[in-house]
């Protein structure tokens, strides 16, 4: 084993207006080592990796590659050094084929035919199933990641960086990925593995650097740590103790029956015979890998899509299938979407004005806006949910993700809903705000509201839900109480495997 | 070189300063142009910025020109704020002029004073109907409103030409392409003796107040604008994009049609092929320079009128072609767009 | 029969203007930038071309002048829309308004000017073939250039790496940027190319097609070219075909009048504009189809580091 570090970062600093993303970071990665970079959302991991890959320039500090000091000014230079990166959000072009996509990511001047051959060779070398001639828009999310990985492998990397690679994979696909990574490490490649998933890091990685709020707070051997100890390092405190489970749930408030609906998007997923029930005083969690129909299901629930067959969406008995969002809110169904800026709130408008999207308490006769009442309403929500903002007129886009999410969740809960549908409640949200939001959801449940949470974060769903269902290929699994749900079971269901009987009808499942 | 850095919150100061800076830049370029053309730059400044304000009559002329610009711009502001790009206001203006003129031609020497009302209503209806074509094609067939409304401008101009060269030509007009002059009963009344300022001015100011209330104090106006700011948020909120489309186009079509009616039943007094004076396009600039805000647009409409009158004076006093107005208008819009960058971005000088 | 040959010939000639402009717009729209200033660029280029031929007597120089004028205006547009991230639609509109105002202003001296006599062009041998000879082979070289340009562009877009890069920038500038491509520079180059071609089309109008200068002489062809790019779903071959069809519709009005059809002239003049609306409606009916074919980032600003 070489004693010269593959990558050595010293005192790396990066500032953005209002926040220090990286503060004096020191990091060393040895060749052949799988090195985890652990931290919660907002800890600064992605920024650090963008610096290493040349997408962003550091304000201070030094970087050494194989012992030589280097400055990486662009991804082009990074690739020339032998650094390759697989992003969390893929940089693939939907209308082009796999081969064309990979070709664009390679700097040397091969012909398209040569690239196609190399893709096949590399893919079979590592056991990755990839067809170079397929257009990318036909691929599932997991397949797209494989394309990204093949593209990275073709550059013969000495350092491979993976940014949250498993957020889009089923547990089984994660295992397959780990096999590839171990093979790569054994060949001498250094791997930087960014994640906040503790059990994965313990299963895969040789070393771990923990970041919190832009600083390195610890360095350890994950194989010697437990989930609890890693969590303590990551968050600086014991994980929050959750309130005891609520009393028994009441009557069914929200019901979906035989909901079948084609997607409005050209590359969407059709819903097939979706059925679920949510009772007052309970949280139903819907798990699933992105791209399996969640967006379509949520649009049918919120009223943004009003083409559902009559009778398929019922709230307390009333048929809402053709109702728009305002009617649904009037009947007590509120919705928190996963996109905060641009959908849950208008970025350029102030918080008070953003209230008008879903709340009409401050609206008088003939639609007259009572601005004073509106502002007071916003201030109340800001105070109650501890939203850090410059005031009720602060532009939505000036808030951090966590604070804006708190405001939006607060806005909907403040409307005393009978049913609250939430999508990805703590995605991209810092630790403190995430805890706040989760406890707000549980408090709402205890007050008797029916809550439906759709999330790709299994840990979060296990924390919040009383019952769980899985959406796969536009179909919904049967429901299972939390106590009986295990990661293995949910993982299997994510691949659509509850449908043993009608395999031939299970449709294209994203895995 | 410099680099742009996004501001966390749009700069309020620059929002007001940007149009002023843009005007300054335009004046600077204009002065340079005068010098290059061998004309006295100070005379140029005087002709554009002082002469139009000097006498009450001049102010009246300013208001006469500003009225149609302001009316059309108000409608366009609602459209642009809703992300509906109605570029064909000129066509709606012409149609309003046509329908108003058609009704005006029905008036005889003994018609009652109410004819004016009918003429103006006809103008509003004509403009709305023309805009409705664009709205319907977009609503039903998803046809791009920029191109449809623009094509309809050319169609409207040809329609006007057909009418004044053909069936509506004044038989006593020595074969000139024009209708006969409208009867007094159908003409828009003037406000003061000795000046051409007419009823259109108070109507425009009324419209300013109305649009302001609509945009900033009603839920309907709010819903309309969310569609332009964040369409996904509008869908999430349940604001109807179809209603936003029709309201925006019918409103701007009606206002443009009213402007057309006021022009032909006011200063022009008849229909001629010169009715399309480009107000529909100049109003686009008025709208942008006025920040799509009713008060701002009132000011920018006056500014734009000064450009028009200055251009005419430049022709008679300085021997420059009248079309210099168009150059300044375009320059103003360009400068404004460039200066507006400062609202959302901060400039960072790189060493 | 001869009438049809003449109609075909004039359709090709008229369509060439649209085709060249639309191909230019296709290039910059493929990069994700929509330039509504086509009309303004074509007007200024028409003036530049005309003035150059008046001064030098050389049509090729006039065409070149037109291309330069178009590219210069496109550069202004590109600087604003790509580097300062102004709204592409508003900036393009500003360019059109400025272009028409400026060309009207600067062109007053040339309104009565005449150009030297143009030669007749004919490809020897081919031009004497029955029917297709007069229809196809007696055109100005620029007409053949348009066809050649179409082929070249089609090959370049779909078979070359540079064309692939352009398409990827148009589809997702963020991803192209993440891969390390200079998105803004590529977009600017595309905009310049588009401006140059619009300029060529504009100069062709004033120096060859109708050799004179009149304020507003482009009469909406820039806007029709924009529409054409959309309903040809950004494919060069379809652009050419569509342009020729439009040329035929435009020419129809003269031939109808010649044949003695008694429709008022103004209604015939309306034909190309009405035709544009009709085709636009037909194409747009299924928004899915447009969305599948449209460069996904069309009209959206791109700021690196966001």
Image (spheres, rainbow, N blue to C red):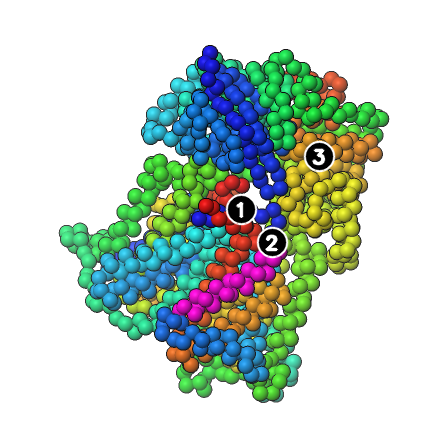
In front of the other: C259 or B124: B124
Q: Which residue shows up at 61% across the image and 13% down it? A: A223
Between disc 2 and disc 1, whose residue precedes?
A: 1
Which residue is found at the position 58% from the left and 48% from the top?
B7
Q: Looking at the image, which residue is at 64% across and 69% down?
A: B207
Q: Is residue A215 magenta?
A: no
* Mark linked to residue A433: 3
Q: Which residue is mark 1?
A: B5
Residue A305 visible at all? no
Q: Say which of A202 and C98 sits in front.
A: A202
Quadrant location of residue A26? top right
Label 2 or label 3, whichever lies nearer to me, is 2
Q: Secondary structure at mark 2?
A: loop
Q: Which residue is mark 2?
A: B11
Badge 3, how many Cα within 10 Å: few under 14, some, many 20+?
many
User: Magenta residues?
Assistant: B11-33
Horizontal and vertical percent position of residue C244: 33, 53
Check disc 1: other Cα within 10 Å, few if <14, some if 14-19, many if 20+.
some
């Amino acid at each position: 084993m070489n004693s010269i570090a593959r990558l050595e970062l010293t005192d790396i600093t990066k500032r953005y207006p209002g926040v220090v993303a990286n503060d004096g970071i020191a990091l060393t990665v040895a060749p052949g080592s799988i090195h985890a970079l652990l931290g919660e959302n907002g800890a600064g991991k992605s920024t650090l990796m963008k610096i290493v890959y040349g997408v962003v320039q550091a304000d201070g500090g030094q970087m050494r590659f194989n012992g030589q000091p280097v400055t990486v000014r662009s991804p082009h230079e990074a690739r020339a050094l032998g650094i390759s990166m697989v992003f969390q959000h893929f940089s693939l072009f939907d209308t082009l084929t796999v081969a064309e996509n990979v070709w664009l990511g390679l700097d040397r001047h091969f012909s398209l035919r040569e690239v196609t051959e190399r893709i096949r060779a590399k893919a079979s070398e590592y056991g990755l199933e990839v067809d170079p001639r397929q257009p990318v828009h036909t691929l599932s999310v997991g397949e797209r990641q494989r394309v990204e990985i093949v593209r990275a492998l073709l550059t013969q990397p000495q350092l491979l960086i993976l940014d949250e690679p498993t957020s889009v994979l089923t547990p089984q696909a994660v295992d397959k990925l780990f096999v590839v990574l171990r093979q790569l490490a054994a060949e001498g490649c250094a791997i930087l593995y960014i994640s906040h998933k503790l059990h994965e890091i313990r299963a895969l990685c040789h070393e771990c650097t923990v970041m919190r709020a832009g600083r390195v707070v610890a360095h350890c051997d994950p194989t010697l740590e437990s989930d609890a100890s890693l969590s303590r390092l990551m968050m600086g405190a014991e994980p929050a103790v959750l309130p005891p489970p609520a009393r028994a749930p009441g009557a069914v408030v929200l019901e979906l029956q035989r909901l079948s609906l084609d997607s409005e998007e050209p590359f969407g997923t059709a819903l097939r015979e979706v059925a679920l029930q949510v009772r007052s005083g309970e949280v139903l969690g819907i798990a699933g890998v992105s791209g399996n129909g969640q967006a379509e299901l949520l649009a049918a629930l919120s009223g943004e899509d009003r083409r559902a067959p009559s009778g398929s969406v019922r709230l307390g008995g009333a048929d809402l299938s053709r109702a728009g969002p305002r009617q649904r809110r009037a009947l007590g169904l509120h919705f928190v979407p996963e996109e905060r800026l641009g959908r849950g709130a208008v970025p350029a408008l102030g918080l008070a004005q953003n209230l008008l999207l879903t709340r009409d308490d401050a609206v008088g006769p003939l639609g007259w806006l009572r601005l004073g009442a509106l502002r007071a309403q916003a201030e109340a929500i800001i105070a109650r949910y501890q939203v850090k903002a410059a005031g009720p007129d602060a532009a939505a886009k000036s808030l951090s993700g966590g604070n804006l999410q708190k405001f939006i969740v607060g806005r909907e809960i403040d409307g005393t809903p009978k049913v609250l549908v939430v999508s990805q409640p703590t995605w991209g949200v810092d630790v403190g705000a995430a805890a706040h939001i989760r406890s707000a959801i549980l408090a709402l449940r205890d007050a008797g509201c029916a809550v439906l949470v759709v999330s790709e974060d299994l840990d979060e769903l296990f924390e919040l839900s009383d019952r769980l269902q899985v959406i796969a290929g536009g179909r919904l699994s049967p429901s299972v109480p939390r106590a009986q749900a295990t990661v293995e079971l949910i993982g299997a269901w994510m691949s659509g495997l509850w449908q043993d009987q009608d395999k031939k009808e299970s449709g294209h499942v994203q895995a | 070189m410099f680099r742009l850095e996004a501001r966390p919150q749009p700069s309020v100061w620059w929002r007001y300063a940007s149009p002023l800076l843009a005007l300054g830049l335009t004046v600077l370029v204009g002065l340079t142009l005068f010098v290059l053309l061998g004309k006295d730059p100070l005379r140029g400044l005087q002709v554009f910025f002082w002469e139009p304000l000097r006498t009450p009559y001049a102010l009246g002329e300013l208001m006469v020109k500003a009225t149609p610009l302001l009316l059309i711009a108000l409608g366009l502001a609602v459209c642009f704020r809703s992300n509906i790009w109605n570029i064909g206001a000129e066509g709606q203006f012409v149609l309003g002029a046509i329908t108003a003129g058609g009704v005006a031609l029905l008036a005889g020497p003994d018609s009652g004073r109410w004819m004016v009302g009918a003429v103006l209503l006809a103008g509003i209806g004509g403009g709305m109907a023309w805009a409705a074509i664009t709205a319907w094609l977009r609503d039903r067939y998803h046809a791009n409103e920029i191109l449809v409304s623009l094509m309809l401008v050319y169609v409207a101009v040809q329609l006007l030409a057909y009418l004044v060269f053909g069936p509506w030509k004044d038989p006593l007009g020595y074969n000139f392409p024009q209708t006969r002059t409208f009867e007094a009963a159908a003409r828009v009344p003037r406000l003061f003796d000795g000046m051409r300022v007419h009823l259109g001015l108070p109507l425009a100011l009324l419209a300013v107040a109305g649009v302001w209330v609509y945009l900033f104090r009603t839920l309907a106006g709010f819903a309309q604008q969310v569609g332009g700011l964040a369409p996904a948020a509008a869908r999430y909120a349940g604001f109807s994009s179809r209603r936003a489309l029709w309201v925006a186009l019918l409103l701007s079509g009606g206002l443009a049609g009213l402007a057309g009616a006021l022009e032909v039943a006011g200063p022009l007094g008849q229909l001629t092929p010169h009715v399309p004076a480009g107000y529909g396009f100049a109003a686009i600039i008025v709208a942008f320079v006025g920040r799509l805000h009713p008060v701002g647009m009132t000011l920018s409409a006056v500014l734009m009128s000064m450009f028009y009158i200055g251009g005419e004076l430049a022709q008679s006093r300085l021997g420059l072609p009248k079309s210099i107005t168009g150059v300044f208008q375009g320059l103003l819009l360009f400068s404004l767009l460039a200066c507006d960058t400062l609202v959302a971005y901060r400039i960072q000088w790189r060493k | 029969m001869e009438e049809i040959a003449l109609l075909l010939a004039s359709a090709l000639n008229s369509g060439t203007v649209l085709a060249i402009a639309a191909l230019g717009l296709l290039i910059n729209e493929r990069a994700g930038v929509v330039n509504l200033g086509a009309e303004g660029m074509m007007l200024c280029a028409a003036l530049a071309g005309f003035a150059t031929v008046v001064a030098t007597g050389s049509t090729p120089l006039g065409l070149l002048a037109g291309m330069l004028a178009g590219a210069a205006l496109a550069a202004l547009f590109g600087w604003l829309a790509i580097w300062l991230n102004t709204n592409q639609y508003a900036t393009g509109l500003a360019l059109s308004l400025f272009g028409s105002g400026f060309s009207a202003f600067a062109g007053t001296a040339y309104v009565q000017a005449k150009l030297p006599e143009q030669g007749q062009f004919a490809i020897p041998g081919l031009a004497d073939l029955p029917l297709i000879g007069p229809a196809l082979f007696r055109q100005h070289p620029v007409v053949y250039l348009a066809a050649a340009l179409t082929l070249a562009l089609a090959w370049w877009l779909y078979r070359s790496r540079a064309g692939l890069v352009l398409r990827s920038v148009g589809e997702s500038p963020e991803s192209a940027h993440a891969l390390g491509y200079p998105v803004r520079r590529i977009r600017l180059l595309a905009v310049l190319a588009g401006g140059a071609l619009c300029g060529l089309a504009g100069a062709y109008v004033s120096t060859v097609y109708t050799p004179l200068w009149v304020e507003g002489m482009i009469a909406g062809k820039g806007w029709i070219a924009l529409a054409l790019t959309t309903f040809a779903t950004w494919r060069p071959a379809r652009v050419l075909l569509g342009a020729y069809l439009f040329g035929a519709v435009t020419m129809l009005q003269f031939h109808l009048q010649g044949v003695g059809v008694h429709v008022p002239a103004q209604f015939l003049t309306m034909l190309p504009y009405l035709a544009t609306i009709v085709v636009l409606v037909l194409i747009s009916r299924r928004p899915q189809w447009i969305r599948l074919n449209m460069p996904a980032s069309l009209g959206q600003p791109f700021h690196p580091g966001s």
